[in-house]
Image: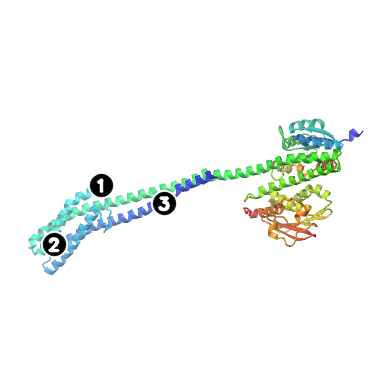
Amino acid sequence: MPNFTIRYIISLAIIAPLIIGIYFLNGQVQKTQLSDSRIINLAGRQRMLSQEISKVSLKIQNTTDEAEKDAYKKELEKAVTFWEGSHKGLREGSEELGLPGKNSETVKKLFVAIEPVYQEMVEAAKNIVRKLELGQSDTNVNAFIKTVLVNEAAFLSGMDKIVFQYDQEAKTRVESARRMNFLLLWTIFLTLIAEGFFILRPAVKRLERADKLKDEFISIASHQLRTPLTNVQWVAELLLKKETLSEKGREYVGDIMTSTKNLSSLVDTLLNVSRLDVGEVSARLESINVVEFIQGLIDESAPICDKKNLKVSFHHSTESIKANTDKGALRNIVQALLSNAIEYTLDGGTIRIALEKMSQHLVLTVQDSGIGIPKKERVSFLFQKFHRASNAEKVKPGGSGLGLYIANQAVKLLGGKIWFESEENKGSTFYVELPLESGKIKGHKLLS
Amino acid sequence: MAENTKKTILIIEDELLQLKSLADEFTDEGFQVLKAQNGEAGLALALREHPDIILLDIVMPVMDGMTMLKKLRENVWGKGVPVILLTNLSADNDQRIKDITTTEPAYYLVKSNWALRDVVEKVRERLSGPHS
């Protein structure tokens, strides 16, 4: 079904990028979260650094110890460098600090708002360091310290707003990613449902229909093929009975009848093969009385057995042996074994059919006093399609070599076993073991 | 009179050649033969003539054998008349036969497996059997 394949591939083609999309989206969310938390941390640290700068500036103002002053100066210088670097990174981005520098318009505006305060603080702090290095008077330095302290509060409140804004934006991003994820998952879910409805269900329906059509075909083909055969057979029979024919003439009509009989059984055989040989057929189980069923098949073959003067007997322990099995397959098995027994047993011989019920199985035995199977025959070959035992041709020229193959396939379908014992010129016994409940081997696959 | 002991058989078969063969054979074998080529004609003939036995094909135009049999069984007389289904359908593959053989124990013969004289035998057996 090319249609099915294409549709199935299309549905996979829809689902696959969706799954990949979810994978990338989640990766992206993780990256964004990492970057957002880094930005928020740094923005928070900026607040702390501004406080640190004020604190150190005050310490510088309050000490007279030169060594101490020098140490505070270094501390201040370090803090300012960090502060400046982070500020630049937050506004413009920094690979080193892992900052993207892609601020929203709101954040940009907030940065613009605190920029004068920031610039004044930075310049003042830098001047403190510079003046201290030059050894200038405390009065000179104190003016810059005052500038730092004056601007600190404004910077802090401005930076608070920025941190808050960053936080809000990060939350919004996570929320929209979650929504996107949800949307993608729903799309996958809906695609799978659509796949079930529009691809798998029609495909299953088509298979069921094909199965039904196959059955119908077999039924119609068997009817159509048999009808003209019956015509020939019956007209030939009447010709033989009603008309006065020469010896040769009777022989010719006899030949016609033999051929039509052979053709008729070949038609049956081929139809059975077509049913069993599709690769995978499922057993259609129903509860039947196997004794009655086999008796029916024996009755059907009565005319030919009578003609060959064969003594046919059927032994069964009870009148009714119920089994849950496939009628068609069981018919295939019994007919194949019975017609082989009839074909390969010479006139006046015996055929003994036995049915025995075990706890879980039934065992069917078909024993004949026929020509048997030569020892040299490979057992596995006998169950193969078109294979015939080497002595079969002499007794029945032009056999199809399909009987045992069909029986074997049908036995497999029912989850049973088939085997035989045979001695050339003495006879053969075929054994078939079948489960009473073939349902337990549901879905058994045929080997073809 | 021999005529009075003659059994009447109704053969319902759409395939003309087969109808002819069966009719010839049964006439030869001393039966009074009635012929019909579809279920509808067969049913009318059966209900009018009350034959001793009916040979019934399944796949036929106008009215198939199964429908005819069902209608026949609805009739007081038709309930008891022995019917032999004669077809080339195989029982395992055809739902129609499955349906009917589960509702009544019908004799059922696959034509291509049976010679004319065997069909006659079967009919005689049925006529003398417990169901007749």
Classed neighbour count for the residue bearing mark 2: other residues with Cα under 10 Å, few (<14), some (14–19), many (≥20): many
Per the image, the residue denoted by label 1 is: A105
- Name the residue that disc number 3 marks: A20
Q: Nearer the viewer, residue A383 or A412?
A: A383
Res. B110 in view? no
| Chain ID at mark 3 | A
Crowd band around label 1 with a 10 angstrom C-alpha radius: few (<14), some (14–19), many (20+): few
Instruction: First in sequence, mark 1 or 3: give its number.
Output: 3
What SS does tag 2 mark?
A: helix
Residue A172 at x, y percent in the picture: 33, 49
- The type of residue carrying mark 1 is Glu
x 79%, y 33%: residue: B35
Q: Chain of mark 2?
A: A
Residue at 78% over, 60% down: A424
Which scheme is used to colour this image of the protein? rainbow
Q: Nearer the viewer, residue A434 or B89?
A: B89
Chain label for disc 1: A
Q: Position of residue A221 (x, y in %)?
A: 68, 42
